[in-house]
Image (cartoon, helix red, strand yellow):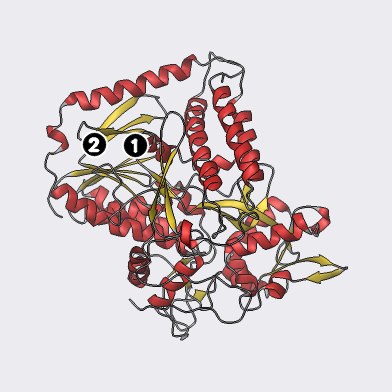
């Protein structure tokens, strides 16, 4: 085992954080992992359908170039192309690495890696482990991390919440301040570099497919410390969510990839509208296309099942043994919460808030505009442009960790000044600030219920900043958000003398969710075009002349300030996306 050479902090124990930990520890770097929950309960565990890589075990002549192009094309050309190309080139090696690490990928009778079809592609490219792919990958990464724990290079702090980064007068990150959620003690953690890998912020929208820990609070904390947030307006609405009273539950895109069909009744007969409207892709059109189609059928045409905003996702025509083998995990979820057996009765689904293509702005080595502060996984903006292809999320999480780990190690090995040489006042100042903020929370004794306030905000965002966006409604939404931020100052609970640990955490995170809601809403208001998941009927066309740009939001006390930077399109030229005809445009340039 290599000698310790420096120290980093990884905030978040999902796939991106664990993979970065592995790659940094390989270089002899000491790692502290801070996680809200036990790392095996990180939100990566909820991913179902699989992970993309051009393995071509089906003999379809798939290539990493085609994977790259499908990703750029599916993302409506908003992603910087060189890092996406690097990710797709690395994907087969990452999958093979995970297989060697013990992940039990589903295989063919011949022992080859099995692949399934996902949306926005025409070749089977998605490796999977039944319908629990995220869980298997997460557990596989954690087993590798535990090896380094045993050697003393890695230490986990589970049940800790990140509060803020420690940034010195030279704008260099020197550590973090975090809170133990069991004891409520606040501590500083010193390090040569920090990686934020805290996942997406779907809970900002209230009901979503995300876990309750996915508030985006950590990303907003460093946003308020001067880190820019990119492409916040691009929020993926997954077309096949099971709507519940408490939250939405994902019915994986794998269900469509394995032969599931979406339909509703029209003129008294089953109508397979995706197959009629998009014959080249049928039920596996990209998520933004499918979500808008379902919205149109339910909201605009009034053809939802039982008069509600829902359509059928039908698997009942497929063999039961096949379904149990390939999709058993999600079928059990549906049956447990809905009561019907989807092997026999079509599932009822409707689009649900699912994933943020936007996130913390980073360079191609995943460093933010603060030296020594990095971000990876869903909380960064890098790889998906305006719309994420299904099964590219697990890949981007693994790859971003795989890439950033060695980059952080190199940075740490060459840092000018170790964290041990930083004057104590730098840490004391941030620690004092966070303790004062906690005391202010304890003093809040107003009449506003934070959970009711959050519910109101989520309902409003899902109504106005979701599948269809209208400028008048976006303006009204931001005005209402500002009113809610004033109401926040009057928060209290029924028994203000007995705040629970969970209440304190939620109220603190709610403030950050409100900051993010303004970034999303105003980013959408500014972008007068339709691109990927961002759709405005007033501006139905993509506008490359004015909007082939990355949005960058910066925090100010008066609300987000926006800047825009050009997207790198050096490998393929943008073309119009078309999913309703056979064939599709091909790349005009080769790398």
Quadrant of the snapshot with the C terminus: bottom left
- Give the position of the N terminus as an image quadrant: bottom left
Asked whether disc 1 touches disc 2, contact meaning CB atoms under 8 Å apart, the reply is yes
Q: Could you tell me residue 483's position as x and y percent? A: 59, 27
- Residue at 62% in and 69% down: 256
Pinpoint residue 307: horizontal percent, then vertical percent. 83, 54
Q: Is residue 214 left or right of residue 301?
A: left
Q: Camera-side residue: 584 or 448?
A: 584
Q: Is residue 100 visible?
A: no
| Left or right: residue 231 compared with residue 533 | left
Quadrant of the image occupied by residue 37: top left
Q: Residues within 10 Å of mark 2 (few under 14, many from 20)?
A: some
Would you say 223 lies left or right of 535 here?
left
Where residue 146 sits in the image (x, y, percent)? 30, 51
Left or right of 245: which side holds 569? Answer: left
Mark before the other along the chain sequence, 1 or 2: 2
Q: Secondary structure at mark 2?
A: loop
Where residue 486 sits, quadrant-wise, is top right
Is the residue marked by circle 1 packed among few (<14), some (14-19), or many (20+) residues within 10 Å? some
Q: Which residue is mark 1?
A: 226
**Residue located beneath label 2 in the image:** 171
Q: Is residue 461 visible?
A: yes
Kindly identify the residue that appears in the image at 67 percent across and 72 percent down: 320
Q: Is residue 101 above or below residue 30?
A: below
Per the model, the C-alpha gap separating discs 1 and 2 is 10 Å
Residue closest to the eye, 13 or 528: 528
Q: Which residue: 45% across, 37% down?
A: 560
Q: Nearer the viewer, residue 17 or 295?
A: 295
């Amino acid at each position: 085992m290599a000698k310790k050479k420096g120290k980093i902090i990884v905030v978040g124990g999902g796939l991106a954080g664990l993979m970065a930990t592995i790659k940094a520890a390989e270089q002899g770097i000491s790692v502290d992992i801070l996680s809200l929950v036990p790392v095996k309960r990180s939100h990566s565990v909820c991913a179902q359908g699989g992970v993309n890589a051009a393995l071509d075990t089906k003999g379809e002549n798939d290539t990493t170039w085609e994977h790259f192009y499908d990703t750029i094309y599916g993302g409506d050309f908003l992603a910087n192309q060189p890092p996406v190309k690097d990710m797709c080139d690395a994907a087969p090696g990452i999958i093979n690495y995970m297989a060697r690490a013990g992940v039990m990928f589903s295989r063919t009778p011949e022992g080859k890696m099995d692949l399934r079809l996902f949306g926005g592609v025409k070749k089977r490219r998605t490796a999977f482990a039944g319908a629990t792919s995220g869980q298997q990958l997460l557990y596989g990464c954690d087993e590798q991390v535990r090896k380094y724990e045993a050697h003393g290079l890695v230490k986990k702090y589970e049940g800790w919440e990140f509060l803020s980064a420690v940034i010195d007068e030279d704008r260099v990150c020197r550590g973090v301040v975090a809170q133990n959620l069991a004891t409520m003690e606040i501590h500083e953690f010193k390090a040569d570099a920090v990686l934020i890998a805290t996942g997406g912020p779907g809970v900002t929208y209230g009901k979503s497919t995300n876990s309750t820990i996915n508030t985006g609070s950590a990303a907003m904390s460093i946003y308020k410390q001067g880190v820019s947030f990119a492409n916040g307006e691009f929020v993926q609405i997954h077309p096949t969510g099971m709507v519940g009273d408490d939250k939405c539950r994902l019915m994986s895109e794998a269900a469509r990839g394995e032969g599931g069909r979406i339909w509703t009744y029209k003129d008294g007969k089953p109508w397979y509208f995706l197959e009629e409207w998009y014959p080249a892709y049928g039920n596996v059109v990209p998520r933004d296309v499918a979500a808008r189609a379902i919205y149109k059928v339910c909201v605009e045409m009034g053809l939802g099942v039982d008069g509600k905003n829902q359509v059928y996702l039908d698997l009942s025509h497929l063999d039961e043994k096949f379904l149990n083998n390939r999709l058993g995990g999600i079928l059990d979820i549906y049956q447990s919460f809905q009561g019907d057996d989807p092997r026999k009765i079509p599932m009822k689904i409707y689009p649900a808030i699912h994933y943020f293509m936007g996130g913390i702005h980073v360079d191609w080595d995943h460093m933010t505009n603060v030296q020594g502060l990095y971000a990876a996984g869903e909380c960064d903006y890098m790889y998906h442009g305006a719309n994420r292809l299904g099964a590219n999320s697990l890949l981007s999480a693994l790859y971003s960790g795989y890439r950033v780990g060695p980059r952080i190690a190199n940075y740490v090995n060459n840092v000018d000044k170790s964290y041990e040489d930083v004057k104590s006042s730098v840490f004391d100042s941030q620690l004092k600030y966070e303790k004062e903020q906690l005391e202010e929370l304890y003093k809040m004794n107003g009449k506003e219920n934070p959970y009711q306030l959050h519910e109101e905000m989520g309902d409003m965002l899902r109504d106005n900043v979701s599948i269809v966006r209208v400028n008048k409604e976006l303006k009204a939404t931001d005005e209402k958000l500002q009113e809610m931020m004033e109401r926040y100052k009057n928060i209290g609970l029924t028994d203000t003398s007995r705040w629970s640990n969970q209440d304190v955490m939620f109220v603190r995170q709610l403030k950050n969710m409100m900051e993010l809601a303004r970034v999303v809403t105003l980013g959408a208001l500014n972008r007068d075009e339709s691109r990927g998941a961002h759709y405005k009927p007033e501006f139905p066309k993509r506008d490359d002349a004015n909007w082939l740009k990355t949005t960058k939001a910066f925090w100010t006390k008066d609300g987000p300030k926006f800047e825009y930077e050009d997207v790198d399109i050096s490998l393929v030229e943008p073309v119009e996306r078309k999913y309703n005809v056979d064939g599709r445009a091909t790349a005009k340039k080769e790398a």
